[in-house]
Amino acid sequence: MAKVKPFKGIRPPKEMVEEVVSRPYDVLNSEEARSEAEGNPKSLYRIIKPEIEFEPGTDEHDPKVYEKAVENFHRFQKEGWLVPDEEDKYYIYAQTMDGRTQYGFVVAAWVDDYMEGRIKKHELTRRDKEEDRMKHVRVNNANIEPVFFAFPDNEELENIIRTVTAGKPEYDFVAPDGFGHTLWVIHDKKIIDKITEEFDKIPNLYIADGHHRSAAAALVGAEKAKNNPNHKGDEEYNYFLAVAFPASHLKIIDYNRVVRDLNGLTPAEFLDKIRVNFDVEEKGTEPYRPNALHNFALYLDGKWYSLTAKPGTYDDKDPIGVLDVTVSSDLILRDILGITDLRSDKRIDFVGGIRGLEELQRRVDSGEMKMALALYPVTMDQLMNIADTGNIMPPKTTWFEPKLRSGLVIHKLD
């Protein structure tokens, strides 16, 4: 069962929250972070992307960069830009995008649940990326940024969301990207105990986004337990920072593909090969969005096409075979275009659905890419089914938006 607990969050005073909080470390590069933090000494980027404190081009893995993260984390606390709560709390965090709001619980999740597979993953992680975040957690002795979990819907927790969010929030602001962020601090001990009790009935949590952060946080916790001769199991390092959302609140956005060439084929030859496994319908010059599972949108030579996979080309009984990312990877990218490794092939690039179909069209029309393929998004049910069956999703399958804002609540490991 999912074990979570409340904790003494470290967070910005209400009047400073917009200056402190930031986008997650992995959605922007060093130069973008430098630009966003310019003129703002309170920006969290100075802790999560501390290379911006050095000359441009400084290696973000240089030991002095990690040291700067710790120095800045201490300074933020000394200056009163980050202040600890005096008692253990849970928090409810709401994100609003396009008029739709999703509500999650900010919790400390149990390391053992990750190590023993009760926190389920659907993606492979890269050891170099894990190691980078592990160093960051180790040196700061804190989870500065949360991971993004989903859990099967629970009516009691929904009731708590309704009760708490009827009250006055601690933070309520719209970030520069137009997404709304609202946070409530839960003070009522009865509600806090009820949250712990209800999560204890939930068999599994699912990593929606942040596989590297989850691995790093859990591995550092396990490492601290191993290195402590007086380890008892109730220490703060046995837990890590997460925001857990009911699955029905979340919507996965499409994750699309653009390809540089047609593997020596003319557009007409390429379409002929596509027709072997797909029903093809020309849709004109206006962007066409896939309307169901196994329906794709192709943009080629200034025109949009609907591609519908023919029966027998996919396996709806197989958690991986049913995915449109599998169908398109096998029947189009591999069999026609010769792209076999989505992680490393330089002929392909990936575009998050948040950027719209117009971005696919722009990249093809500019001559940079030859064709674009838009996919119908994966559902939360599919994601949880894949995790439950121990399968791993193909690369670049899911895109969650909005991203969690970093710095709203931080979890210290002591």
Image (spheres, grey):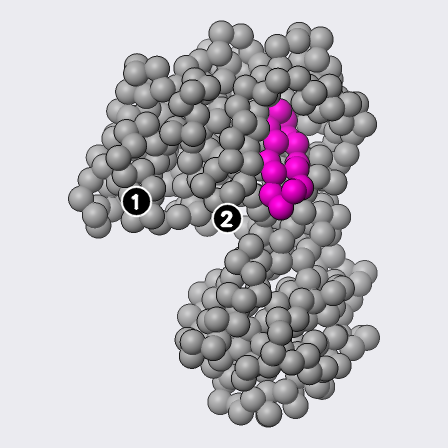
Residue at image coords 49%, 24%: 409
Give the residues in magenta.
Answer: 90-105
Specify whether 139 is left or right of 375.
left
Instruction: Tell me the CA gap for discs 2 and 1.
Output: 29 Å
Q: On the image, numbered disc 1 is attached to which residue?
A: 35
Of the image marks 2 and 1, the number of the one nearer the N terminus: 1
Q: Nearer the viewer, residue 385 or 175?
A: 175
Q: Secondary structure at mark 2?
A: loop
Q: Is residue 264 above or below residue 312?
A: below
| Residue 150 visible somewhere in the drawing | no
Number of marks in picture:
2
Q: Nearer the viewer, residue 194 or 118?
A: 194
Residue 129, x across and y down, in percent = 41, 46
Q: Is residue 81 above or below residue 202?
A: above
Residue 209, x across and y down, in percent = 56, 43
Residue at image coords 57%, 58%: 353
Residue at image coords 48%, 27%: 408
In this view, the mark in front (2 or 1): 1
Q: On the image, numbered disc 2 is attached to which residue?
A: 125
| Residue 301 visible somewhere in the drawing | yes
Q: Is residue 164 magenta?
A: no
Say what amino acid the circle numbered 2 marks: Thr
Picture quadrant where residue 229 is located: top left
Q: Quadrant of the C terminus?
A: top left
Q: Which numbered tag is attached to residue 361?
A: none
Q: Is residue 121 above or below residue 64?
A: below
